Image: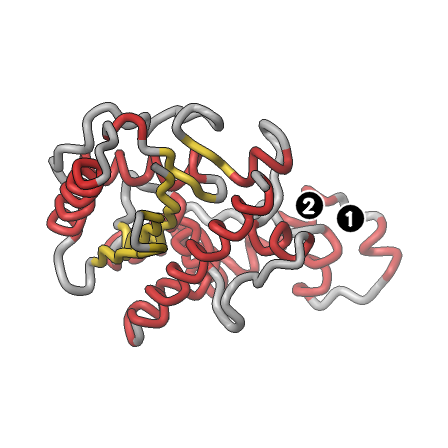
């Protein structure tokens, strides 16, 4: 049984962000993406010779000295925004799945807006089991389909389940799932093992409707605070997009 799946994640709790700011101020470092040219610009340096004969290391050191207080919070917030990829500290906002049965295509939503995360995960795992039972399929033989699902969605669900002390569907390869073994990863199928292509770029390449306009992963956290339905609809659209990509790749 094919089950198309996508998740949306939030960020680490507010306490974690505040702690990051405190630690960053105490040991301020420039972001790794900061270049010598940008540092010079931020410092207001205009003398071409001075810039040329100042090493990148010294330029970054000057930048750190000047902006330790004012930039620390910005740097900390950049780190905090990236916690959405870390299941050790970040909860799942919602899980959306789609599947085909004798009555046609159906989808289901599991969200933390109604339940807490543990309850949501319990509901998800229970639903997968009941879905398999209704379709006479062994749970371990569900073919989960998604984009970067083997390295992100499946292990994220497993780790958050373990952290919340929630029993997972037995037999599913949540960690180290391999494309082709009850797991179809559209990214791996197209780009090859170890390579990457975004779902949006792949859909455009294939002439398939891409991501929801005006939404992307970076907006999920803020949008979830005010309009969780918009995030859920975005997740459902991703599931539909993956379904269309999968059908094209396996046509």
Instruction: Assign a secondary structure to mark 2.
Output: helix
Number of residues whose C-alpha sits closer than 10 Å to that of mark 2, classed few (under 14), some (14–19) or many (20 or more): few
Where does label 2 land, which residue?
58
Q: Is residue 42 above or below residue 134?
A: below
Residue 248 as seen in the image, left or right of residue 135: right
Horizontal and vertical percent for residue 85? Answer: 40, 45
Q: In whole angstroms, how far apart are the C-alphas of marks 1 and 2? A: 6 Å
Foreground: 165 or 42? Answer: 165
Question: Left or right: 197 with respect to 213?
Answer: right
Residue shown at 28%/51% (left/top)? 92
Quarter assignment of residue 133: top left
Res. 22 visible in picture = no
Label 1 crowd bin: few (<14), some (14–19), many (20+), radius 10 Å: few
- The residue drawn where x is 68% and y is 42% is 57
**Residue 60 pos. (x, y %):** 64, 49
- What label does residue 54 carry, if any? 1
User: Relative to 55, is 29 on the left or the right?
Assistant: left
Q: Quadrant of residue 152?
A: top left
Quarter of the image containing the N terminus? top left
On the image, the x and y values in percent for residue 181 come to 42, 24
Task: Tell whether label 2 touches label 1 (CB within 8 Å).
Answer: yes
């Amino acid at each position: 049984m094919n089950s198309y799946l996508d998740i949306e994640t939030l960020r680490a709790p507010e306490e974690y962000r505040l702690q990051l700011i405190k630690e960053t101020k105490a040991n301020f470092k420039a972001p790794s993406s900061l270049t010598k040219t940008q540092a010079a610009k931020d410092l207001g340096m205009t003398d071409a010779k001075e810039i040329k004969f100042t090493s990148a290391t010294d330029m970054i050191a000057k930048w750190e000295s000047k902006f330790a207080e004012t930039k620390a919070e910005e740097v900390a917030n950049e780190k905090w925004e990236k916690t959405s990829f870390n299941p050790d500290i970040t909860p799942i906002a919602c899980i959306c799945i789609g599947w085909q049965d004798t009555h046609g295509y159906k989808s289901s939503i599991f969200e933390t807006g109604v339940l807490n995360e543990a309850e949501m995960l319990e509901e998800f795992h229970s639903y997968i089991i009941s879905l398999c039972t209704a379709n006479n399929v062994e749970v371990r033989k569900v073919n989960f389909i998604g984009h970067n699902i083997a390295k992100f969605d499946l292990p994220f669900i497993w780790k958050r389940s373990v952290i919340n002390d929630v029993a997972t569907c037995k037999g599913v390869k949540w960690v180290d799932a391999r494309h082709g073994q009850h797991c179809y990863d559209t990214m791996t199928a197209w780009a090859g093992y170890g390579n990457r292509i975004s779902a949006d770029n792949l859909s455009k390449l294939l002439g398939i409707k891409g991501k929801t306009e005006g939404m992307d992963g970076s907006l999920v956290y803020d949008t979830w605070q005010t309009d969780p339905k918009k995030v859920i609809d975005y997740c459902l659209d991703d599931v539909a997009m993956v379904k269309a990509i999968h059908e094209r790749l396996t046509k």
